[in-house]
Image (tube, rainbow, N blue to C red):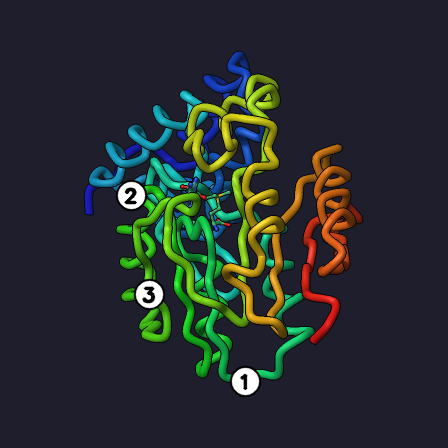
Amino acid sequence: MREHKPLNEYFSSKMFEFESLNIDEYKKKSELLIQDILEINKSDIYTKNYHVPYEKIQLLENAFLKLKKNTPVQHILGKSFFYNDEFFTPPGTFIPRPETELIIDCVRNDFPILEKKNVLEVGSGTGCLSISIAKLYKNFFVTGIDISKKAIKTSIKNANKLNCSNVQFAEKDFFNMNFNHYDIIISNPPYLSVDEIDSLDKSVKNHDPFIALSDNKDGLSFYKFFINNIDLFLKKDGIMYFEIPNSPITESIIGLVKKNKKISSDIFKDFEGNNRVIKIYFNIK
Ligand SMILES: C[S@@+](CC[C@H](N)C(=O)[O-])C[C@H]1O[C@@H](n2cnc3c(N)ncnc32)[C@H](O)[C@@H]1O
C-alpha cells in the first residue's frame, strides 16, 4: 500500500485551513470524518507513525471540501446513529436528532414489549423513529408516511438494511390523506415558524430540507391538524406522542389541547431539561 504524508501532519494542515473559516466544532467534525474514512481510532490521528494511504486521499479531500461548505458530517458520510442503529442519511434528508429518541422512551413507558398495536408516524423522514420502534416491538405494525420522495426511498433502504419487516413507508401528504384509526400516533413534525429559519445555523438552514424544518407558517399547522381532527385517526384508547419545540410555540400547543375538552396531555422533558414531547389522549377511555 503506497502512503501519503503522516496523518498527524495532514490533520494539522487541515486544521490550519479551517482556522479562518467560520465552521462550528470543525476539529471534532474533522476527527469524525478521518476516523470513518480511514477506519481508525481517534488516537491514531495524533500518533506519529500513521500515514494516510494514497487511495484514501481523494476521499478525504472531497469530505473536507464539503465540510468547508458547512455540510453536516452526517450528510458527508451519508449515515447517522439513532437509538440503537446506524441509518442512511444522504443529503436531502433530515438528520435524526438525539432528543427525538425521547418519543421512543415515552412509548416504552406506556406499552409492554409484547403488545400488538398499529402505529402511524407522520413525517417519517429517514425512518429512524418508525424502524427503532418496530424493532423493539415485534408485534407492532408501523406505517410511516412522508411527503418527500427522497425520505421515503431512504426509509425503505434503512428498513431493508436493518431487516425490519413490521414497518412500511408511503409517500403521502398528511393534510390530504385518508386515515385509519391507529392505537399509537407519533410525529416529529416541521415545527419552526417561517420567521425562525433565517436565524438557524447555516449547517441546518442550508442542509436539512426546508419542508422538514418549517410548515412555512407559524409552526403550528401539524399540531392544529392532529388536535382538531383527533377523532379521525386515533382510537378511543389510543395515544399520540409528538416532539415539541423549546419555544413559545409549545405554549400555543398546550393551549390548543386545553381548548379541546375531550383530550388531555402530559409533557416530558429531554436530557437538557427542555419540554420535548407532548403525549395526547382522550379523557374517557
Ligand atoms: C423534522 S422531520 C422528522 C423526520 C424524522 N421523523 C426524524 O425525526 O428524524 C419532518 C418530516 O416531515 C416531512 N413532512 C413535511 N411536510 C409533510 C406533509 N405535509 N406530509 C407528510 N410529511 C411531511 C418532512 O419531509 C420531514 O421528513
- The quarter of the picture where residue 142 lies is bottom left
Disc 2: which residue: 150
Camera-side residue of 123 and 13: 123
Mark 2 and mark 1 lie on one chain; the one further toward the N terminus is 1
Disc 2 versus disc 1: nearer the observer = 1
Disc 2 versus disc 3: nearer the observer = 3
Q: Position of residue 276 (x, y in %)?
A: 70, 49
Q: Position of residue 79 (x, y in %)?
A: 38, 49
Mark-to-mark CA distance, 3 and 1: 19 Å
Q: Dot 1: what SS?
A: loop
Mark-to-mark CA distance, 2 and 1: 32 Å
Contact between marks 3 and 1 (CB within 8 A): the answer is no
Whether ligand 1 has any atom under 8 Å from the Cβ at mark 2 is answered as no
Q: Dot 3: what SS?
A: strand
Residue drawn at x 72%, y 40% as measured from the top left = 250
Mark 2 and mark 3 lie on one chain; the one further toward the N terminus is 2
Q: Amino acid at mark 3?
A: Gln
Residue drawn at x 49%, y 39% as measured from the top left = 31
Disc 3: which residue: 168
Disc tally is 3
State left or right for residue 28 relative to residue 94. right
Q: Is residue 154 above or below residue 180?
A: above
Q: Position of residue 87 (x, y in %)?
A: 39, 56
- The quarter of the picture where residue 253 lies is top right
Contact between marks 2 and 3 (CB within 8 A): the answer is no
Camera-side residue of 33 and 120: 120
Residue drawn at x 52%, y 38% as measured from the top left = 190
